[in-house]
Image (cartoon, grey):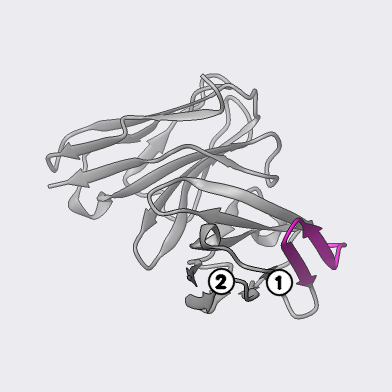
């Protein structure tokens, strides 16, 4: 079963605009993570937010977590061409040992 | 070695053949994972290991086996490859189960 579901599946925005991606999940979690994947490469970790946290920042990235709605959002501000990539959320399903990934959002930054 | 490595980078394999994908990390991480990535399906967990000597099944374990004889290595074996196992395989590790994962560069496997 798919734990995390990202929305939208694909997103194209102009360089300099903000990009927002959402993730919904189904079970209780200890933490939620966001990863980036450039084409043909392995995933790179961006941010981990714990279930008792509501918001976290890292540079141009802002992640929010709403455990009552079982959802998270990733905001990238002042987007750049280098932000073009796929973005995945991942959760520990049922606070289990397994980390389950969503299908990802493909972000394309237009020049 | 720096980080996590996988071998081979790519492989074309005849159906029915046995294949082992190698994964090695030098970060002394306790947990290791194997994922497959298919277009439109994202990453799906095949097997994982919380610590040396233990393994567990993920979302799609059938047709695959793993072993964790030591901390550094986590090989994935396809006993008898089938075309549906054509995919990109990623190995990852984390210091502790459930925490930040570090990914290898992937192995592109084609089963004909």
Q: Chain of mark 2?
A: A
Q: Residues within 10 Å of mark 2 (few under 14, many from 20)?
A: some
**Residue B85: assigned label:** none
Residue in the picture at 29% in, 43% down: B108
Residue A90: percent from left, percent from top: 61, 59
Left of B18 or right of it: where is A34?
Answer: right
Residue B4 picture location, percent across and down? 52, 30
Q: Is residue A1 visible?
A: no
Chain on which label 1 sits: A
Residue at 17 percent across and 39 percent down: it is: B12
Image position, residue B100 (x, y; %): 67, 44
Q: Which residue is mark 2?
A: A15
Left or right of B13, for residue B59: right
Q: Secondary structure at mark 2?
A: loop
Determine the secondary structure under disc 1: strand
Discs 2 and 1 carry the same chain letter: yes
Q: Answer left or right for A77 relative to A44.
A: right
Q: Name the foreground residue: B56 vs B106.
A: B106
| B31 relative to A108, above or below | above
Return the residue found at the far front.
A111
Q: Is residue A99 magenta?
A: no
Give the residue at mark 1: A72
Q: Residue at x 71, y 71 (%)?
A: A72
| Mark nearer the N terminus (2 vs 1) | 2
| Above-or-below relation of A45 to A72 | above
Task: Give the camera-side residue of A16 and A2.
Answer: A16
Q: Dot 1: few (<14), some (14–19), or many (≥20) neighbours within 10 Å?
A: many
Rendering coords of residue B52 (x, y %): 60, 25
Total tally of numbered discs in the picture: 2
Residue sitting nearer the eye, B30 or A59 = A59
Q: Which residues are magenta?
A: A51-65
Is residue A62 within the magenta segment? yes
């Amino acid at each position: 079963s798919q734990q995390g579901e990202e929305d939208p599946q694909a997103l194209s925005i102009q360089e300099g605009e903000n990009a927002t991606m959402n993730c919904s999940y189904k079970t209780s979690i200890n933490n939620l993570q966001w990863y980036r994947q450039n084409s043909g490469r392995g995933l790179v970790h961006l941010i981990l937010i714990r279930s008792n946290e509501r918001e976290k920042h890292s540079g141009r990235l802002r992640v929010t977590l709403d455990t009552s709605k079982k959802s998270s959002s990733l905001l990238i501000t002042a987007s750049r061409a280098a932000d073009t990539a796929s973005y995945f959320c991942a959760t520990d399903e049922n606070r289990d040992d397994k980390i389950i990934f969503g299908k990802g959002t493909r972000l394309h930054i237009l020049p | 070695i720096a980080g996590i490595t996988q071998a081979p980078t790519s492989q074309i394999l005849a159906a029915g053949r046995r294949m082992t994908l190698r994964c090695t990390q030098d970060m002394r991480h306790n947990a290791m994972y194997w994922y497959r990535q298919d277009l439109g399906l994202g990453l799906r967990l095949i097997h994982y290991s919380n610590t040396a000597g233990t393994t567990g099944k993920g979302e799609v374990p059938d047709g695959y086996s793993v072993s964790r004889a030591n901390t550094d290595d986590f090989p994935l074996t396809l006993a008898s490859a089938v075309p549906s196992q054509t995919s990109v395989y990623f190995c990852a590790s984390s210091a502790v189960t459930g925490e930040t994962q570090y990914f290898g560069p992937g192995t592109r496997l084609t089963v004909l």
